[in-house]
Image (cartoon, helix red, strand yellow):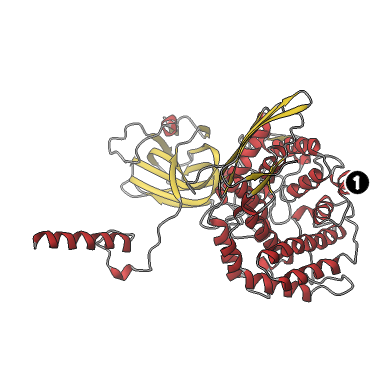
């Protein structure tokens, strides 16, 4: 009897442990009301002290650079003293070395007051931003904003103990003590990094260290934006933007392989923008929805997920068809067509690019229809593309437009490259559509030029102190500009606060934007040369383009396992070592 009771108790405990994510003191009234945090929290100490206001007001600040235990101490050992007088404010700027998403943990070691003390905490993606003020009205160059995530917080902190503040994208933190005639002791000021703890299955390494850094920086930029859902920015644009997602998804495919954040985000987007609404209210973004589905299926061959979206895809094609006349006139967007912000002034070029995007999306929709065994949808997508092709629109010198036309197959690739995309090298490139410009160059066989532009354009952000890639960038900004990780000297431009336009003037400009990560995917596909020919990498093509590189090696994730390659120049030839998992076949040239 005793053994039976013990067995029943163990069985009950087994089922309770699986039924409740909380300890057993939480009863069934909590069912359906709890959710485990799917992300990981890691504490990071500052890498350096950028600046402090006064040696007399701030002492022993280097203790903040040391890793400790998050436990307050009453003895005030090993603490940074901040002393506020009646007229002087102590301030300190901390650099955590890398762009992060999360907040700040302050561990306090005592105060001269018996009450909490008032402080100001500012988060910044640059030193300029962490020293900036909130815009008094709207979005202004030289000012920052708090509209998407609080970055400027005035709050009381306890005398002893611990407090955590903030949820935003940042690299720098500034702390000001506002309480007059007060001493506080800070034992630790650690950043809270909140991220998905997932392995980098893809890799890229070559004889060019600058390209290696660019590949990894793009991967990290997207990784930070893989929060509960796939965002485009961790400081701003903390929502699902379907167009912005495409460069992120192709990067996830090459770096992480399958990750639930992509299907979760596509599911939620369909809930947030039910037909007949366009995704995010932008017709082009509904076109990107179809292209993303195609690329996701080619990577993962997830037929169940594709079937889950079959009704939405069918309804979207019906909607698009109703907006395209027999003569090729399209009215998907009644007012403006949108590609990316830098292309906006060139309305003729945007029109050409938007029409090309329709054709590209229909080309991919045809392939999706074949997988779904829907000949009706295949015929509809082909018919839409045929109608659009009845009208030819010149890209008007717009690199974005010409790139899309080349990819869609409605403009000769050499003409698109030589006459538009390649003109001026990185001039006219953008962080979002730069990926498609690189693709157009590759289609024309201009691999060396594409690699040169990657090195110059994305590499220039690294030269200015970037650890993630930006929402926008223009090579002209480099003239007389200071790095983002230093206080801007008198007479120089602030690379963050003095530039930006449209919805990102000044410090509102995001310095970690997932749509900028295209070179990571491009380098894997065209330099490592690994590209799926059949869905799920059942058949793969390996065709490297080394340019000036002496060697390149790397890995690519597939549903079957990891593909590993190494290519080494041997005179005019390339020697390749290739390892593919069981189930993957390499297409013979």
Instruction: Judge by depth and name the residue closer to the eye, 540 or 331.
Output: 540
User: In which quadrant of the rendered image does the C terminus lie?
Assistant: top right
- Residue at the left extreme? 1
Q: Residues within 10 Å of mark 1 (few under 14, many from 20)?
A: few
* Image location (x, y in percent) of residue 201: 55, 42
Q: Is residue 45 left or right of residue 400?
A: left
Which corner quadrant of the image does residue 465 belong to?
top right
* Image location (x, y in percent) of residue 140: 69, 53
Q: Is residue 317 visible?
A: no
Q: Is residue 24 above or below residue 202?
A: below
- Residue at the top extreme? 571
* Image location (x, y in percent) of residue 536: 61, 52
Looking at the image, which residue is at 74% across and 68% down?
378
Q: Is residue 424 left or right of residue 60?
A: right
User: In which quadrant of the rendered image does the N terminus lie?
Assistant: bottom left
Instruction: Judge by depth and name the residue closer to the eye, 176 or 126.
Output: 126
Looking at the image, which residue is at 48% across and 43% down?
176
According to the picture, the residue beneath numbered tag 1 turns out to be 419
Which corner quadrant of the image does residue 522 belong to?
top right
Q: Is residue 193 visible?
A: yes
Q: Is residue 542 above or below residue 396?
A: above
* Image location (x, y in percent) of residue 353: 82, 58
């Amino acid at each position: 009897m005793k053994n039976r009771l013990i067995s029943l108790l163990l069985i009950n405990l087994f089922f309770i442990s699986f039924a409740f994510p909380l300890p057993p003191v939480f009863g069934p009234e909590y069912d359906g009301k709890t959710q485990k945090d799917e992300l990981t929290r890691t504490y990071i100490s500052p890498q350096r002290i950028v600046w402090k206001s006064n040696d007399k007001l701030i002492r022993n600040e280097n203790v903040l650079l040391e890793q400790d235990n998050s436990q307050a101490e009453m003895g005030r050992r090993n603490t940074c003293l901040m002393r506020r007088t009646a007229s002087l404010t102590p301030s300190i700027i901390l650099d955590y070395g890398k762009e992060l998403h999360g907040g700040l943990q302050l561990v306090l070691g005592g105060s001269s007051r018996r009450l909490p003390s008032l402080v100001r905490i500012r988060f910044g993606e640059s030193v300029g931003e962490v020293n900036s003020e909130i815009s008094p009205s709207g979005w202004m160059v030289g000012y920052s904003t708090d509209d998407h995530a609080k970055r400027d917080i005035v709050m009381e902190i306890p005398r002893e103990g611990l407090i955590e503040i903030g949820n935003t994208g940042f690299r720098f933190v500034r702390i000001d003590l506002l309480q007059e005639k007060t001493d506080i002791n800070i034992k630790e000021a650690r950043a809270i990094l909140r991220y998905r703890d997932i392995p980098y299955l893809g890799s890229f390494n070559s004889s060019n260290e600058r390209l290696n850094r660019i590949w990894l920086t793009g991967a990290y930029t997207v990784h930070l934006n893989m929060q509960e859902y796939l965002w485009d920015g961790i400081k701003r644009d903390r929502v699902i933007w379907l167009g912005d997602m495409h460069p992120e998804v192709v990067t996830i495919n090459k770096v992480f392989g399958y990750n639930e954040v992509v299907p979760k985000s596509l599911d939620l987007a369909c809930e947030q923008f039910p037909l007949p609404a366009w995704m995010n209210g932008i017709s082009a973004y509904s076109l990107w929805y179809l292209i993303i589905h195609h690329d996701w299926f080619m990577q993962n061959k997830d037929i169940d997920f594709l079937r889950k979206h079959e009704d939405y895809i069918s309804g979207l094609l019906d909607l698009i068809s109703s907006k395209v006349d027999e003569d090729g006139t399209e009215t998907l967007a009644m007012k403006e067509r949108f590609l990316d912000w830098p292309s906006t002034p060139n309305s003729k070029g945007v029109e050409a690019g938007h029409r090309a995007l329709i054709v590209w999306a229909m080309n991919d929709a045809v392939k999706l229809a074949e997988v779904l065994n829907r000949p009706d949808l295949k015929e509809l997508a082909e018919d839409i593309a045929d109608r659009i092709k009845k009208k030819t629109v010149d890209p008007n010198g717009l690199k974005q437009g010409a790139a899309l036309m080349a990819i869609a197959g409605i403009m000769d690739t050499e003409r698109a490259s030589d006459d538009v995309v390649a003109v001026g090298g990185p001039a006219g490139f953008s962080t979002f559509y730069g990926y498609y410009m690189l693709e157009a160059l590759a289609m024309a066989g201009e691999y060396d030029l594409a690699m040169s532009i990657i090195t110059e354009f994305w590499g220039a952000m690294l030269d200015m102190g970037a650890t993630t890639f930006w929402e926008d960038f223009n090579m002209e900004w480099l003239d007389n500009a200071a790095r983002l990780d230093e206080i801007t000297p008198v007479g120089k431009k602030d690379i963050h606060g003095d530039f930006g336009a449209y919805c990102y003037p000044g410090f509102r400009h995001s310095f970690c934007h997932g749509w900028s990560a295209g070179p990571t995917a491009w380098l894997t596909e065209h330099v490592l040369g690994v590209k799926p020919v059949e869905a799920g990498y059942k058949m793969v093509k390996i065709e490297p383009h080394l340019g000036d590189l002496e060697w390149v090696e790397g890995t690519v994730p597939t549903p079957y396992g990891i593909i590993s390659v190494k290519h080494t120049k041997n005179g005019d030839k390339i020697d390749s070592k290739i390892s593919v998992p069981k189930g993957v076949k390499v297409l013979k040239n």
